[in-house]
Image: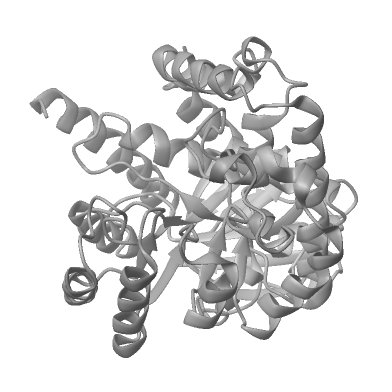
Amino acid sequence: MTASFVIRTSFFWCAALAVSAANGESTAFVNVNVVPMTSEVVVESQTVIVVDGVITRIGGVADTAVPDDAVVVDGTDRFLMPGLGEMHGHVPGRTSGNLDRVLGLYVANGVTTVRGMLGQPSHLVMRSEIRNRTMLGPRLITSGPSFNDRSVSSPEQGSQMVRDQHEAGYDFLKIHPGLTLKEFNAVAGAANDLGIRFAGHVPEDVGVQRALAAGIATIDHLDGYMEALLPPNDDPLGGLAGFFGVFIADQADLSKIEKVAQATADAKVWNVPTESLFEHVTVADWSPEDMARWPEMKYMPQEVVAQWESAKRDVLNDVNYDAQTARRAVEIRQKIILALKNAGAGLLLGSDSPQIFNVPGFALHRELEFLVAAGLTPFEALQTGTVSVAKFFSSESSFGSVREGLEADLILLDANPLEDIRNSRRIHGVMVRGTWLSRADLDRLLGRFER
C-alpha cells in the first residue's frame, strides 16, 4: 500500500466526518413523514431530533422544539425511514484500493449496516473505528476467514479454527461449500459450545435438513433448497446442479416447498435469499453486454465489469444450461421465498455485493424489488432490511427503526416506499449514526468513483 493511498482514503472519510462536526452535533428533520417500520404506518408532519448520533425526540411539528444549534433538514413531502442492512456483503481489507469505493457506495445508497461474509483480521479494527465514529461507514458485523475444503482439513482442525476465531473476537463464522459432513458437524458443535453463530452456505455433503438441525444461523442464497426438493435418490447430471441448483429446477418437486419452509421456521433459521445475485447470473433475458451498461456499472472499475460479463457468459454457455429451466428455477425460488415468509421463517435483505453485476448498495435496491416480485409487500420487503436485521442481532434497542433512543441510521426519501418499492431509490439524504449527508454530499461521493 502506497503512502498516497493512505492519505487519499483517510482524507475522504475524515473530511466527511469534519463536515458533520462543523454542522453541529444536533440535526432536526422538520415536518417529515416518519416510516418507523415497526408497523405499516406513516406518521405525518413530525419533527425528529438527533443529538450526538441518537434519536432523542420525535413529535408533532407544533409540539417539538428545535435546538438552537441544530442543522435543520426540511422534511416537507419527504419520508424518513431506517437505514438498510446488507446482510450478505463483502468488505475489502484496510489495504485494499477498493475499500473507500465499497463503503462509499453502500453509504450513498442508504446502507447503514453490513454483515461482512468474508472476514479478515483488519475488519476487527475497522469494526471498532466505525463503532466509535472515527471512521464513516456502515455498522460492520464481521465473520472470520471462511470454513471450506481448503481451510479445513479434518474435524479436529475445523474445531480448532472455531476456537481461534472465537478468541480473536469475530462476530460469527462463515461456512463455504466443500466441508464434509464430519467436518461440518465438528465446526457446528464447537460453535454451539462456544456460543458463536455460524452461517452461509450449505455444503453438499450436509444438506438443508442437517444444517437446520445443527443450528445454522442463516442459510444464504437459498443454498441447498433446490436439492431438498428433488425426489428421493435423484442425482441428476451426476451431481452437477449448477449455480444454486439452476440446472436441476426441472427435477424439483414443488409439493415439498411448504414442508421444508415449515422445517426452517421450526428450526428458527433465517434466510438471506440474494435473489438479485441468482437472477443476474442465470436469467438469459439480460445479456452480459446490456447489464454492463446498467447505470450503476459506471461506479465499478471497467476490468471488474468485464470480469462479470465473462462470468455470466460462462454460465449461459455451459452445456447443461437451459434458459427455460433457469426461468423455472427463478419461479421456484420465488415460491420458496413466499413459503418461508408465510411459515414465519425469518427473511433478511442481502445481495452478495460486490459480485456479478451486483454493485454495492445499488444491488440492495434491486433485491428489494425481487422480493416484492416474489410476493412480499413493499413493507414486508423493507422489514427484511430494517427491523428484521435488528431482531436477528437482538439489537432492537439499538437500531432498525425510527424510534426515540435508537442510533440515528436514517434515510430521507422523496417518495413513500410503502406505496412503491422503487421509491427506496429516491434518496434525498442519508444519516449514518448522526452524520448527515445531503443529496449534494452523496452526489459528490458518487462522483469520486464514476468512470
- Quarter of the image where the N terminus is located: top left
User: In this view, which residue lies farthest toward the bottom?
Assistant: 193
Q: Relative to 74, does residue 428 appear above or below in the rendering?
A: above
Q: Is residue 342 visible?
A: yes
Q: Position of residue 170 (x, y in %)?
A: 27, 68
Image position of 181 (left or right of 287): left
Q: Residue furthest right?
A: 419
Q: How is the image coloured?
A: one colour
In the foreground, 197 or 260: 260
Horizontal side of 214 relative to 84 (left or right) equals left
**Along the horizontal axis of the image, is 188 left or right of 121?**
right
Question: At x 54% / y 65%, what residue is drawn?
Answer: 207
Quadrant of res 166: bottom left
Q: Position of residue 123 (x, y in %)?
A: 26, 55
**Where is residue 95 shown, x and y percent of the image?**
18, 37
Residue 416 in view, yes or no: no
Give the answer, above or below, for where 47 lies relative to 369.
Answer: below
Identity of the residue drawn at 65% across and 75% down: 403
The residue lying at 75 percent from left, 78 percent from top is: 262
Query: Would residue 100 be found to the left or right of residue 259 on screen?
Result: left
Q: Position of residue 41 (x, y in %)?
A: 87, 69
Q: Nearer the viewer, residue 297 or 44?
A: 297
**Residue ID at (77%, 26%):** 323
Count of marks, rendered view: 0
Q: Please tell me whether residue 213 is drawn above or below residue 428 in the rendered image.
A: below
